[in-house]
Image (cartoon, rainbow, N blue to C red):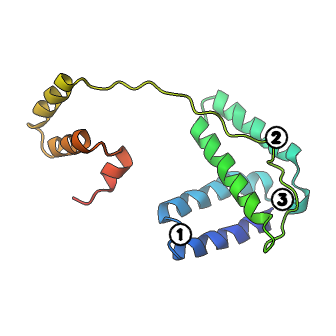
């Protein structure tokens, strides 16, 4: 599988250059391949990668979740990327694989997390208190009035 990962990473680089994949996404994918996939599957022959090997890997990930060493979202991200790489490897122009060893591997279901939402009175109290602490007041007002997410907020150019 090492050759699959190397070739896929070249494909990823091309997609990044073409603007089809964001730099941050490509960086994350490369890190996932190097930290998780190569170490686990790098020595496997691509045509010999079995669903048993994938299931054993899934069990290891589940144990890490149980120990608090891996978050369920990270598990889902790993599963999604590995499925994507294997799908790419099965394409007719690649032909690394003829089978799908992840055919029966599913992502974890998302759990609904309950969030505390400020009442309007509480929000106005917070914004008034923040006025004494620029630029925190501008940041809080931006979040309160636009609904941007944390990543979007930190990506803004001020």
Question: Earlier along the polypeptide chain: callout 1 or callout 3?
Answer: 1
Left or right of 132: which side holds 108? right
- Disc 2 target residue: 55
Q: Quadrant of residue 96?
A: bottom right
What SS does tag 3 mark? loop
Q: Residue 43 has which mark? A: 3
User: Of discs 1 and 3, which sits in the foreground?
Assistant: 1
User: Of discs 3 and 2, which sits in the foreground?
Assistant: 2
What SS does tag 1 mark? loop
Is residue 70 at least partly visible in the picture?
A: no
Rounded to the nearest angstrom, the CA distance separating label 1 from label 3 is 30 Å
Q: Taking 131 as reference, is 35 above or below it?
A: below
User: Of discs 1 and 2, which sits in the foreground?
Assistant: 1
Q: Quadrant of residue 95?
A: bottom right
Q: Looking at the image, do the residues carrying marks 1 and 3 touch, with CB atoms under 8 Å apart?
A: no
Rounded to the nearest angstrom, the CA distance separating label 1 from label 2 is 31 Å
* Rendered location of residue 38, percent (x, y): 73, 57
Left or right of 78: which side holds 43? right
Q: Identify the residue at image location x=53%, y=69%.
A: 20
């Amino acid at each position: 599988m090492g050759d699959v990962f190397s070739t896929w990473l070249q494909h990823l680089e091309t997609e990044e250059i073409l603007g089809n994949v964001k730099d941050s996404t490509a960086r994350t994918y490369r890190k996932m391949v190097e930290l998780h996939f190569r170490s686990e599957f790098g020595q496997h022959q691509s045509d010999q990668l079995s669903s048993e090997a994938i299931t054993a890997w899934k069990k290891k990930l589940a144990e890490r979740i149980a120990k608090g060493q891996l978050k369920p979202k990270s598990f889902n991200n790993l599963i999604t990327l590995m499925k994507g790489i294997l799908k790419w490897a099965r394409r007719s122009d690649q032909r690394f694989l003829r089978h799908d060893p992840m055919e029966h591997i599913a992502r974890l279901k998302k759990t609904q997390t309950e969030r505390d939402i400020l009442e309007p009175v509480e929000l106005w109290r917070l914004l008034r208190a923040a006025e004494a602490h620029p630029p925190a007041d501008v940041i809080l007002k931006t979040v309160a009035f636009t609904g941007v997410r944390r990543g979007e907020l930190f990506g803004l150019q001020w």
